[in-house]
Amino acid sequence: MGLLQVISIVFVVYLFGNTGALPVQEELRKVFHRQRRNARVLIASSTTSRRCNQTLIGSGYAFHTSTSDVSLWYKNGWFMAVHHDGNINGTSEARSPDIKLQLQSVGRSLVRIFSKQTCLYVAMASTGKVYTTEEPTDETVFQQTQESNGFETFASNKHFTPISRDLRRHFFLSMRKNGHIKNGKRSTRNHKTTQLSVMQSRETS
Ligand SMILES: *[C@@H]1O[C@H](CO)[C@@H](O)[C@H](O)[C@H]1NC(C)=O
Ligand SMILES: *[C@@H]1O[C@H](CO)[C@@H](O)[C@H](O)[C@H]1NC(C)=O
């Protein structure tokens, strides 16, 4: 039932109320209440967050030891957003539910970035492409580093280019100026497209 129909019923109820046609009024009132109840149920089910199946354990990593609810805010102004269609990009909307993420600790400085509302993990492929997946594979594990200026960076733990025996060129999670995620292979550590603030969310999980 549309808003217009509800409004017209309310109007009719009001009219009958004034003329004293009680049985019809009572009937309409019941219809109206039933519709309202349905609407409430609909609203309740759409706001309850989906329960994610987190019994899957990613290759080589134990189940996370701790979690924190965060938003990731890039130095260039974008929040990282994971959308219901599986797309990952930037939004400037600080109140968007799509920026609510969870950091799952899976080792020393190793985290997964998980979106509870979509049940998707952020991942990086060997090509440097960033994508989302339901499975906590080893491509979903990132090295979290606090840089000297206080900002954080996230680099793929699995994929990198070896430069020498103990030097690696990391693939970072970077956000382009236009709000699209950058290919990890083209990212650099000391750049505002790569550096972000981990903002703790007030809401508890
Ligand atoms: C969760 O995933 C595991 C592994 O794929 C599967 O065995 C299990 O049935 C799933 N549970 C639910 C509730 O879907
Ligand atoms: C980000 O992705 C969402 C969902 O696919 C889309 O609606 C939105 O326009 C995208 N934003 C940018 C900045 O590309």
Image: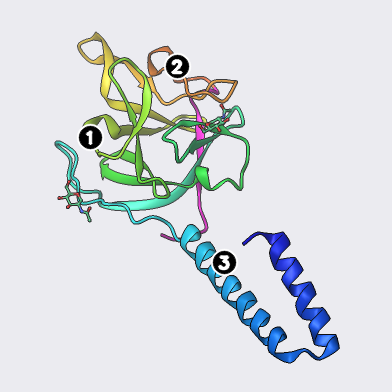
Highlighted range, magenta: 192-205
Eye-nearest disc, 1 or 3 = 3
Residue 50 higher or lower than 32, as above or below: above
User: Is residue 150 something one can see in this rendering?
Assistant: no
Q: Earlier in the sequence, mark 3 or mark 2?
A: 3
Amino acid type at mark 2: Thr
Residue at left offset 51%, top offset 53%: 201
Q: Amino acid at mark 1?
A: Thr
Label 1: which residue?
Answer: 137
Q: Magenta residues: mostly which secondary structure?
A: loop
Q: State the image quarter where residue 122 is shown.
A: top left
Mark 2 residue element: loop
Q: Which quadrant does the C terminus fall into? A: bottom left
Q: Which residue is mark 2?
A: 188
Tag on residue 39? 3
**Residue 203 percent across, percent down from the top left:** 50, 59
